[in-house]
Image (cartoon, rainbow, N blue to C red):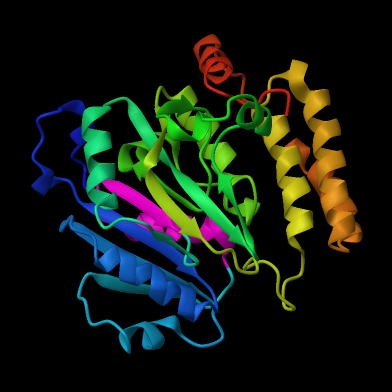
């Protein structure tokens, strides 16, 4: 990890700003190749690519090397399934860049100057620790925006997706993080496995004085494939982790006055989703384990300036 904090000076030379493009993948070869093609076509030269093969049935490295010989591509492999949180932690521990740029293997950048734009945004916005992008999800025959605003605001403000704004959280498909954020906040809690990890880091970063900026001119196309957690070998499903991790997050970071609304709405929404996906048993297991393990968690009291930031910048306090 480079120790240079380029955010302290707007006059820093770009040559000293290195980007680590970090990709976790599992049994998804073809989308990964498409993703890598758009990264290798970027016009910003100072980056590395680190790919984590999260216990794929066949080693991803062999498949990728059959398509690319670029020395900037590095490979890691875990024989044990790590999940999103653990996988991202390993990637960041091995990264050498000032910026950690995450992108899912089933997503890709629309433009070949995306990395250069990301670097410029960090140079120009010295207090920003995390950048969130405009993600367009494609599901079957339709598309939808995947952006860090509550649905209420998206419906109320029709053009909200088109303007640069401070926000209170980022979304996992693709985002960029200064290495200084991780140095100050630490890594993701690995026991999350999958679900809610972005909210954990968002609240922690804000409490440490970093801002999160949504920038609409970094556009990512996303063609979601089956979750890496949804396979026959998985002991627990996505429904289990979603509700369990939500309970943990509410206990750890949500102010007590918002506990009840968060719990009730989370149970209703996740319960309906679990019913539709035939995972209702895992849903109830997630609630049980979430409650039973609360005693091992710490509750963080958010300072007034953190709450002010959340209320001002589309924070999700009631849910």
In the image, residue 247 sits, relative to residue 209, either above or below, namely: below
Query: Percent from the top left, x then y, of residue 143?
Result: 59, 55
Instruction: Locate residue 61: give its quadrant.
Output: bottom left
Q: Does the image show residue 97? A: no
Instruction: Locate residue 10: give its quadrant.
Output: top left
In the image, residue 316 sits, relative to residue 231, either above or below, namely: above
Q: Residue at x 73, y 50 (%)?
A: 242
Q: Quadrant of the C terminus?
A: top right
| Left or right of 114 on screen, residue 81 | right
What are the residue bounds of the magenta stretch?
82-103
In the image, residue 253 sits, relative to residue 310, either above or below, namely: below
| Left or right of 281 on screen, residue 318 | left
Query: Percent from the top left, x then y, of residue 241?
Result: 73, 54
Query: Percent from the top left, x then y, of residue 277?
Result: 84, 62
Instruction: Locate residue 127: give its quadrant.
Output: top left
| Left or right of 260 on screen, residue 252 | left
Task: Indicate whether residue 99 is drawn in magenta.
Answer: yes
Q: Does the image show residue 194? A: yes
Q: Residue at x 31, y 55 (%)?
A: 111
Task: Indicate whether residue 166 is drawn in magenta.
Answer: no
Nearer to us in this view, 79 or 117: 117
Nearer to us in this view, 267 or 314: 314
Q: Residue at x 10, y 35 (%)?
A: 12
Query: Percent from the top left, x then y, of residue 8?
Result: 19, 27
Q: Residue at x 71, y 75 (%)?
A: 231
């Amino acid at each position: 990890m480079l120790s240079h904090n380029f955010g302290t000076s707007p006059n820093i030379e770009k040559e000293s700003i290195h980007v680590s493009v970090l990709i976790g993948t599992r049994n998804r070869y073809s989308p990964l190749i498409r993703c890598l093609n758009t990264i290798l076509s970027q016009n910003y030269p100072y980056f590395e690519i680190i790919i984590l093969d999260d216990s794929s049935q066949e080693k991803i490295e062999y498949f990728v090397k059959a398509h690319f010989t670029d020395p900037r591509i590095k490979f890691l492999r875990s024989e044990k399934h790590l999940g999103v949180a653990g996988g991202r932690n390993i990637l960041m521990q091995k990264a050498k860049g000032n910026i950690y740029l995450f992108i899912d293997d089933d997503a890709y950048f629309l433009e070949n100057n995306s990395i250069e734009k990301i670097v410029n945004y960090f140079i120009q916005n010295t207090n920003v620790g995390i950048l969130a992008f405009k993600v367009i999800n494609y599901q079957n025959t339709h598309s939808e925006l995947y952006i860090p605003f509550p649905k209420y605001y998206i419906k109320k403000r029709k053009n909200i997706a088109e303007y640069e704004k401070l926000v209170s959280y980022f979304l996992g498909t693709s985002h960029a993080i200064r290495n200084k954020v991780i140095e100050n906040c630490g890594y993701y809690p690995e026991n999350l496995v999958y679900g809610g990890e972005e909210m954990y880091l968002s609240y922690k970063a804000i409490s440490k004085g970093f801002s999160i900026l949504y920038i609409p001119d970094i556009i990512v196309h996303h063609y979601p494939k089956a979750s890496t957690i949804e396979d026959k070998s998985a002991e627990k499903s996505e429904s289990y982790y979603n509700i369990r991790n939500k309970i943990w997050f509410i206990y750890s970071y949500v102010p007590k006055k918002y506990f009840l609304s968060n719990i009730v709405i989370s149970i209703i929404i996740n319960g309906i989703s679990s019913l539709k996906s035939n995972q209702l048993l895992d849903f109830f297991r997630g609630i049980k384990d979430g409650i039973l393990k609360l005693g091992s968690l710490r509750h963080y009291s958010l300072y007034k300036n953190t709450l002010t930031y959340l209320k001002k910048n589309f924070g999700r306090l009631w849910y």
